[in-house]
Image (cartoon, rainbow, N blue to C red):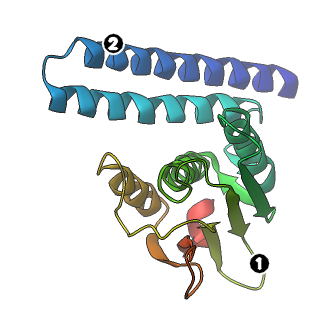
Amino acid sequence: QIDIANGLSREIGHRVGNSLQLVASFLRLQAADSGSENSRHVLEIAGSRIMVIGKIERLLSHFGATHTVDSKAFITALLQDVRSILPDPGQICIDVQVDSTQIASTTAIALGALLVELINNALKHAFREGMEGTLAVRFLAPKSMNQCVVEVEDDGVRIAQGQNSDGVGMQHATEFARMVGGSLICQPARQAGPRPGTMWRLAFSRAAVH
C-alpha cells in the first residue's frame, strides 16, 4: 500500500508540475503576441515564476506520499538542478551547507522558490560581465534553537535591497519569505573592498516548517 501511495503521489506531482509548465508556456506565448511592452514584461515574469514552481512540484514528487520532506535532501536536489542549467558551470562555485530537518511540503515550495529567486538575482547582478565568484547557500536548523535560518551570500559586487532587472523579483522573494512567517534582511557580506558581496538572510520559527 505504501508503494502504491508513493507511486500515486509521484504521478500526481508530475502531472501538477507538467500542468504548471504548460501554463507557463502559454503565458510566454501570450507575452510574445502582446502589443504592449508592459504587458509583455508582466506576462514573461509570471511565466518564469510559474515555471519555477512547476519544477519544484516535480522535484517534490520524487519524495513520495508525505506531507513533509527532509530539508537537506530537498535543497541539495534543488541546487543540483540549478547548477545543471548554469550557462557556465565553471564561472560560479555554489557552496552548500544544509542541516537536516523535516519541513512541510508547502514550506519547501516557498523556500525553494525563494532560493531560486535569490540565486538568480545574484547571478544577474553580483557577478557581472563573466566575473567568477562563489555563492554560499545555507539552511541552518540547530536543535538548540527554535528558529531556522536561510542565507544566500555572494562575493560579488554590492547589490542594493530591491535591486533587480525587472523590479519585481525581490517583491516575490519577500512574499515567499512571508509565506513561512519570516522576513528578509539584506546586508553587505563584508565591510569593505571592491567586492563586498551581499548576504540575504531569512529567519523563521521552527513551528512554521511542520
Amino acid found under the numbered disc labelled 1 = Pro
Asked if residue 69 is positioned above or below residue 170 in the image, the reply reads above
In the image, 23: left or right of 107? left
What x and y, as percent, mark residue 148? 64, 72
**Residue drawn 77% across and 78% down?**
142
What x and y, as percent, mark residue 64? 77, 32
The part of the image, by quadrant, that contains residue 23 is top left
What x and y, as percent, mark residue 106? 55, 47
The part of the image, by quadrant, that contains residue 210 is bottom right
Q: Name the image quarter holding the N terminus.
A: top right
Q: Which residue is mark 2?
A: 29
What x and y, as percent, mark residue 68? 70, 48
Looking at the rendered structure, which numbered label has been put on residue 142?
A: 1
Looking at the rendered structure, which numbered label has been put on residue 98?
A: none
**Residue drawn 48% across and 53% down?**
121
Cα separation between marks 1 and 2 = 45 Å
Asked if residue 114 is positioned above or below residue 2 in the image, the reply reads below
Labels 1, 2: front one: 2
